[in-house]
Every structure is written in C-alpha cells, then in structure tokens.
Image: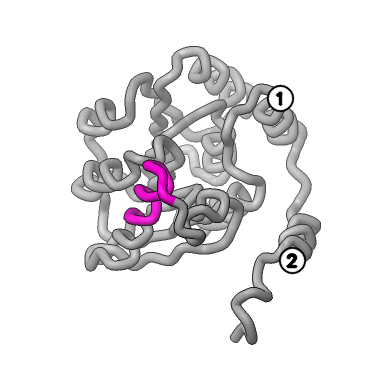
Amino acid sequence: MKSRTDQVIKRVQAEYLDTLLPARDALLARMEAFAAEHNHPIADPEVGQLMKLLVRAKNPKHLIEVGTNIGYSVVVLGRECSAEAVIETIELDRGILATARQFVAEAGLVCEVKFHEGAALEVLPKLAGPFDFVFIDCVKTEYEQYLDQLLPKLEPGAMIVCDNLLWGGKVAEGVHDPSTDALRAFNRRITTDPRLASIVLPVGDGVGISIVNG
C-alpha cells in the first residue's frame, strides 16, 4: 500500500519507469519519430507495452480500434495476434489512413487488418461484431457514445482499453472544457456501469481497462 498518494507518478518516478521500457524495434521507433515530427497523437510507448501484454494474455480474435491515426497501435496489437485474428480500425482522415496502411503493410502482420474510413460514430453501427478486444483513442467528447454503440457488439469477457483518460492531468485538476468534462464523465461511467469491471491506471496519459461482465 502506498504511504502517500503524492508519492506515485511524480516526475522522478515517471522518468525511472521510462528507463524500464523495452527498446522499440526499428519500425515502431520510426513511427514514433514520424508522429512526433508531424504532430500525430499516438499511444505512448508504455501504453503500447501494456496493450501488448493484454493482447498476449487475452488472445483476442476480433479486435476493433476507434482511432487509427498512423497505425502505431495496429502494429502493436497485430504483432501479438494470431493468424486467425482480425483487427478492424477506423480513421476519419483519408491521408492519415493512407499513411497507416503503408506502415501496417511494412509490419507484415500475420493477422487480417480491415481499415474503415469515416467518422467513428457513423462507421461503428455498420460493423457486425462480436468483438472481444476494443481500443479507444479518438474524439474525447465521443468516448461515451463509442461505448454505447460498442457494448451490444461485445462478448462477455471482452476487454476495453481507453487512452488519455487523465488528459494531461486536467481531469483530476477540475479543469472544465468539453473534452475534459467528457472524459471525467466517462471515467465515472466505466467505473460504475454494472456491465463492466473497470480500473483507470496512471499509465501514459491515463489508461482505462474494462472487462465486460458475463
């Protein structure tokens, strides 16, 4: 048990934890550099490592990602999937989706990847499911709507991973703006919804992990 809540995840702890992360391979390192150069928001390396472990433990067969960006998370997830798995991923911007396709093709994943172009709230109703793993990293004000659309398509035991739930500290600091208020409400939702067992972890910019109750 931590002796004081302010002893957890201060700068010195965060910098130390960064030193424990495994080195990324050449492709992921290049994708991280590309994202930094072109200001693309991708999952932090520690979030990628967490998802890698979750997928390895869960061994999902039908994954859905809301928010492709340049395909960083697709590569991370896909490298842990079997050849029988299918990853579906949604991106609004056609140019960014083209970049994602190139990076994912370079990764040479054994699983199938289905790219969907469009607004997530318009694409999700068209997807059949059922899904057993979800990664949400898209428009923050829409997280709760994504959840509402996805829940009927999720198997019991399905895992939901959501990024940016602490939003640079603003959620806990009581800042009020549309994204921060929406994330604060979403955190309360996933941790009180009787259909879910959830926890929000101080990893990266805050990661929520939920399991759909049977």
Which picture quadrant has residue 149?
top left
Residue 141 percent across, percent down from the top left = 35, 40
Range of residues picked out in magenta: 176-186
Mark 2 crowd level (few <14, some 14–19, many ≥20, 10 Å Cα): few
Please state which amino acid type lies under the numbered disc 2.
Gln
Camera-nearest residue between 74 and 124: 124
Q: Earlier in the sequence, mark 1 or mark 2?
A: 2
- Can residue 13 be seen by looking at this rendering? yes
Cα–Cα span, label 1 and label 2: 27 Å
Which picture quadrant has residue 136?
top left
Locate residue 106 relative to residue 164 in the image: left or right: right
- Quick check: is 64 in the magenta stretch? no
Mark 1 lies on residue = 37
User: Overall secondary structure of the magenta stretch?
Assistant: helix
Residue 73 percent across, percent down from the top left = 54, 38
Mark 2 lies on residue = 13
User: What residue is rendered at 64% in x and 74% in y?
Assistant: 6
Locate residue 64 relative to residue 171 in the image: left or right: left
In this view, 186 is above or below 111:
below
Which picture quadrant has residue 198?
bottom left
Q: Under tag 1, what secondary structure? A: helix
Locate residue 150 relative to residue 162 in the image: left or right: left
Residue 188 percent across, percent down from the top left = 33, 62
Location of the N terminus by quadrant is: bottom right
User: What residue is rendered at 50% in x and 55% in y?
Assistant: 166
In this view, 52 is above or below 140:
below
